[in-house]
Amino acid sequence: MRGIFAICALLLAAAWADHHGDHHGHHHHHHPDEEMSCHMLSPPNADFGFALYKHLDAKAAAGKNIFFSPLGISTALSMLSSGARGETHKQLFSTLGYSTFEQNQVDDAYKHLFHMLSHSQANQQLDVGNGIALRNLFSPLAKFLADVKEHYSGDIFNVDFTKPSEAADHINRFIAGKTQDKITDQVKDLDADMAMVLINYVYFRGEWEKPFDGNHTHKADFSVDENTKVQVDMMRRTGRYDFYEDPDNFTTVIMLPYKSNTSMMIVLPDEGKMKAVEGSINKDHIRHWHDSLYRSSVELSLPKFSISAKASLDDTLREMGVTDVFGDNADLSGISDEIKLKVSKVSHQAVLSVDEKGTEAAAVTTLEVMPMSMPESMTLNRPFLVFILEHSTRSILFMGKISDPTAK
């Protein structure tokens, strides 16, 4: 009877570089008259999410689930960019799609975004935040620490990297505490010469607005690919949903709302069309589907699933244009002007479980008045795409592809 959980932790471990360079900071101008809001982040963050998806998909083995938080990864990289300068900053901003913004506009927008997300309703839990684990006796610039706290909901704490396994335990306890113990072993293989680890976490637990009745859940086949079938617990519910068939883009789309500002959009490509859909999908498709949905009776069959996806992002980010920050020419002089820093590790983990209720408390039966016409039918018995959308900030909290609901 658990709800849906999705969590990610993103780690940027900054290591000591082996030489001290000199570097020049640059300053951003403030535009106090500009009304900034978190909505300005929505288009570039969505573009970044789809670009990242395509890179991860290209590397993923056949039949592998892909699941990550574009918002979480953008947040951690934006927090890092607030301490980056010169070409290093330019690469981060360019890859994030922020080239037309100033750093302080992005900082303010994230502050607003965290403010909006923290006003989450009683029926869901949504925690987004960041942490920085610092090498003992290493103190970053006061401005960087203040920015992290004020704009990125950041917690800052010291660890002893000279004892790597103890340092890993310390950081893992922090992440476990922030993710309701859903992610407990994110950090492994720390280096004794690390200077800092940047952590981002997103924890989401929602309750379906329209729960499924567990008595209708039955065993069914799910086709992972042409040759592989797995058996799943298939939930079934007939009800009124926002629904859309898009023949031009070979997809059927349904929106499953949680009791809050959050919904799960499920996109089912037509038989044999997953590759075509993945090749062309972008934020305009999401907007088009969102605007085209209409309320309809739908007989929906959706597998229960609980997946965990881990990805190392170092190579992917390099492919996307973030290169300098990993090398000896990294300019993170906005974090420390005494010590030359570089990033050594970026990893990400996300966990999602979907079942009938959402939470134990959801013992409420909802009666819906159904029209007499035959309902549409949507059976998710082959790979599908999933997006968890937060409406007030227009954020894609999570996105991915469920290729095998039984893979843990």
Image (cartoon, rainbow, N blue to C red):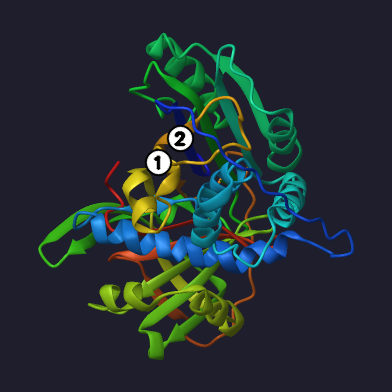
Q: Position of residue 346 (x, y in %)?
A: 41, 39
Q: Is residue 13 left or right of residue 46?
A: left
- Among all residues in the image, which is located at the extreme bottom? 248
Identify which amino acid the numbered label 1 is placed on: Phe
Instruction: Identify residue type, mark 2.
Output: Lys
The residue at 69%/66% (across/down) is 40
Q: Nearer the viewer, residue 367 or 23?
A: 23
Q: Is residue 357 visible?
A: no
Instruction: Check disc 2 and report the residue beneath it.
Output: 342
- Which residue is rendered at x = 50% and y = 67% of the image? 47
- Neighbor class of circle 2 (other Cα within 10 Å; few <14, some 14-19, many 20+) is many
Give the residue at mark 1: 326
Q: Is residue 73 left or right of residue 59?
A: right
Q: Nearer the viewer, residue 85 or 359?
A: 85
Q: Quadrant of the C terminus?
A: top left
Q: Is residue 181 visible?
A: yes
Residue 288: quarter of image:
bottom right
Q: Secondary structure at mark 1?
A: helix
Q: Residues within 10 Å of mark 1 (few under 14, many from 20)?
A: many
Q: Are the two marked residues, 2 and 1, in contact with CB atoms closer than 8 angstroms?
A: yes
